[in-house]
Image (spheres, coloured by chain):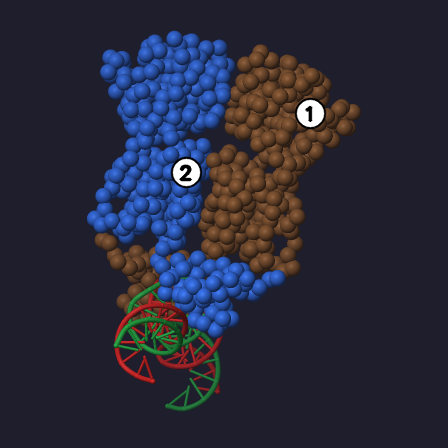
Chain colours: A blue, B brown, C green, D red
DNA sequence: AAAATTAATGCAATCGATTGCATTTCTTGT
DNA sequence: ACAAGAAATGCAATCGATTGCATTAATTTT
């Protein structure tokens, strides 16, 4: 059972007394090979259980039909759903997907980028780690004109394709909604603003306050990494202010949830006494009590779009290249946590 | 900027007037090369921005340092967390991970398996699709003694390594717990029992009933795919029985949740009037109201274990091989949805 | 200084599939 | 029946890194 070596086109060639080139062409349906020989070759290939060696083919063809994906964490709903979208489109186009996670560490991100380059992926789709503040490692790809698509957390200074949502507008919408609901003093929990996403959300928040002639006080904006614990600490801090807020727009749903839990525990009612809006519509947001108002990003569709974009770039090597930034639609989902009215 | 071809060891060799073999050996720190030449070569490699071509290396070495993973869906918490565990261990060992999703379709699973084989992954970690009822496609791997690890949804009839939890015991624990809480008539929502996991959970459920001299009536067991809608339809059916149950052990948390939502909507109180236990401890289970009692599987640790197992197998080609089935610990997490007492 | 070791490097084949450029085989027309 | 053209197949190089077996260079021994 345990064949020492795999069946290769040479084995087939030998058995049929023809050349390996003919076998290769036959298996690729090259019109230069006669119907008869093709049939002979294919049936023998089947019989011997021939499986092409993609590595050899890749080496010769200088392409791997593989797309690399680097995300901060694969087990975060937004990212895994995005990946699912990429994977589906890629699979249908005959591409494989190699996935790595940066764990939000710049060093790991660098290592991964090098590794994927050495593996000669045909394109790279990525969202930056929280620590990423330099971009030299991406030059491996840009220098050689290997298609590169950023999504969500992008590198604004690099000329590449990008898939984003309008985080500024999202921040604005969320804040405006809280204002419309009658909340008077609105705080914001922001993530690391080196990342465009968190920065834009915050700016949208500020803009909404300004447009409504509300105070945008520094003490109302708290920066951290938006974990569960971060959310809890942030809400404690906010409630301890001389003049505490009566609503918070949170940079993600996780921190929004932990705020709700904390508020419940100290007897502050949501949404009656306090309004909360989160971000990214995690699966739990719909089902907790109170359910969390949030901004929905079309993660799966973003993945599909990213894949389409990169496949298009891979297959139609356009020169000179033009890069697009695609902004995907978002939706403010109003749920209980902010329904004061 | 746009170099036509990449730098290869031959380019380095030519520039230094030495042979490619020497360059190769130097870069791999082969002791046969003198310190001086190594230094010369490495510094030039750095200067030229040499990046090894992993494809070429893989072809020659007959190994890819790549592990394939096939799961039903990457954006399901259990699977993405498992993947995260695999990825972490694999990365530290210098391995890449190629991920595909079967979408619970047998045909897609087959295609993927072939593709991963052709890509010559060094090992394969997989959990079966819901449709998988034949296993011939895995012979590609078993025949050639390529390490194969099943997890969660395994193929009992194949001799391979396996990572599982004791689903039987889980089903038993869940049911016993409901009994202990004073529920009298306990139903079960089962997934497709071609899959060992759902089958075992059901058997555990039955066994618990028997041990407690409770009736195990056919009408109390419903089979479907455990989606949200499936859960809702199941609970409707159960409530419509002449003699309806007062508790359900659900095959997953999703269906458990949708049952809770439905029960709320018709004014049946959980856990006072009706008890619910789910399975797999989805992130939402902890935060919904009432929170869902469930069985926690150590997804991340299972991924780590699977990776360790397969790496060990890859790196110490043992013959004859011995296969192990590793049963990981689970935990019944008792929350509100079943706390009658 | 010649012989014997040891150290350092090079040659050429290999991994398996692909492909430009022959070469051979088969048709067709006259 | 034979030249000319078309059709089918083969040769050999290529993709880039690796490695067993030389070969050359440097060092030590006598």
* Circle 2: element type: helix
Q: Position of residue A174 (x, y in %)?
A: 34, 19
- Which quarter shows the C terminus of chain B? top right
Q: Which mark is residue B219?
A: 1
Question: In the image, what residue occupies the spot 32% across and 39% down?
Answer: A150
**Rounded to the nearest whole Å, what is the CA distance between mark 2 and mark 1?**
39 Å
Q: Position of residue B285 (x, y in %)?
A: 54, 25
Q: Tell me which chain the residue with mark 2 is part of.
A: A
Q: What residue is drawn where x is 64% and y is 14%?
A: B273
* Residue at x 64% of width, y 21% of height: B238
Residue A291, position as x, y percentages in the image: 46, 18
Mark 2, Cα crowd under 10 Å, few <14 / some 14-19 / many 20+, is: many
**Image point 64% across, 51% down: which residue?**
B159
Front-most of A281 and C1? A281
What residue did someone put label 2 on?
Answer: A85
- Residue A180 or A331: which is nearer the viewer? A331
Q: Report the mark closest to the observer, 2 or 1.
A: 1
**Left or right: residue A165 compared with residue B229:** left
Which numbered tag is attached to residue B261?
A: none
| Residue B227 visible in image | yes
User: Residue B230 at x, y = what percent?
Assistant: 56, 27
Write down the quadrant of residue A219 in the picture: top left
Residue A323 against residue A32 in the figure, above or below: above
Give me the chain letter of mark 1. Answer: B
Determine whether label 2 and label 1 are within 8 Å by CB. no
Residue sitting nearer the eye, A289 or B46: A289
As helix, strand or loop, the secondary structure at mark 1 comes to: helix
**Closer to the camera in the image, A299 or B26:** A299
- A205 with respect to A240 (left or right): left
**Furthest-left residue in this view:** A320
């Amino acid at each position: 059972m345990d064949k020492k070596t795999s069946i290769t086109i040479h084995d087939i060639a030998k058995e049929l007394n023809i050349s390996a080139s003919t076998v290769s062409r036959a298996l690729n349906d090259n019109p230069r090979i006669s119907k008869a020989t093709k049939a002979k070759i294919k049936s023998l290939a089947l019989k011997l259980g021939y499986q092409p060696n993609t590595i050899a083919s890749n080496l010769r063809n200088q392409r791997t039909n593989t797309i690399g994906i680097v995300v901060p964490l694969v087990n975060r709903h937004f990212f895994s759903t995005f990946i699912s979208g990429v994977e589906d489109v890629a699979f249908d186009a005959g591409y494989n997907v190699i996935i790595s996670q940066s764990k939000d560490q710049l060093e790991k991100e660098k290592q991964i980028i090098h590794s994927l380059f050495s593996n000669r992926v045909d394109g790279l789709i990525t969202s930056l780690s929280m620590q990423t503040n330099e971009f030299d490692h991406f030059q491996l790809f840009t220098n050689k004109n290997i298609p590169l698509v950023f999504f969500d957390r992008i590198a604004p200074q690099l000329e590449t394709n990008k898939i984003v949502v309008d985080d500024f507008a999202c921040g604005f919408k969320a804040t405006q909604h809280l204002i419309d609901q009658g909340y008077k003093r609105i705080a914001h929990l922001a993530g690391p603003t080196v990342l465009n996403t968190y920065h834009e959300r915050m700016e949208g928040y500020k803009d909404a306050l300004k447009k409504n002639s509300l105070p945008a006080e520094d003490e109302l904006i708290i920066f951290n990494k938006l974990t569960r614990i971060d959310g809890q600490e942030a809400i404690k801090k906010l409630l301890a202010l001389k003049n505490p807020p009566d609503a918070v727009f949170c940079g993600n749903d996780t921190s929004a949830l932990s705020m709700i839990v904390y508020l419940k525990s100290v007897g502050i009612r949501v949404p009656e006494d306090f309004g909360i809006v989160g971000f990214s519509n995690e699966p739990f947001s719909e089902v907790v009590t109170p359910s969390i108002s949030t901004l929905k990003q079309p993660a799966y569709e973003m993945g599909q779009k990213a894949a389409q974009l990169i496949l298009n770039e891979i297959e139609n090597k356009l020169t000179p290249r033009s890069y697009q930034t695609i902004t995907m639609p978002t939706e403010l989902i109003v749920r209980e946590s902010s329904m004061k009215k």
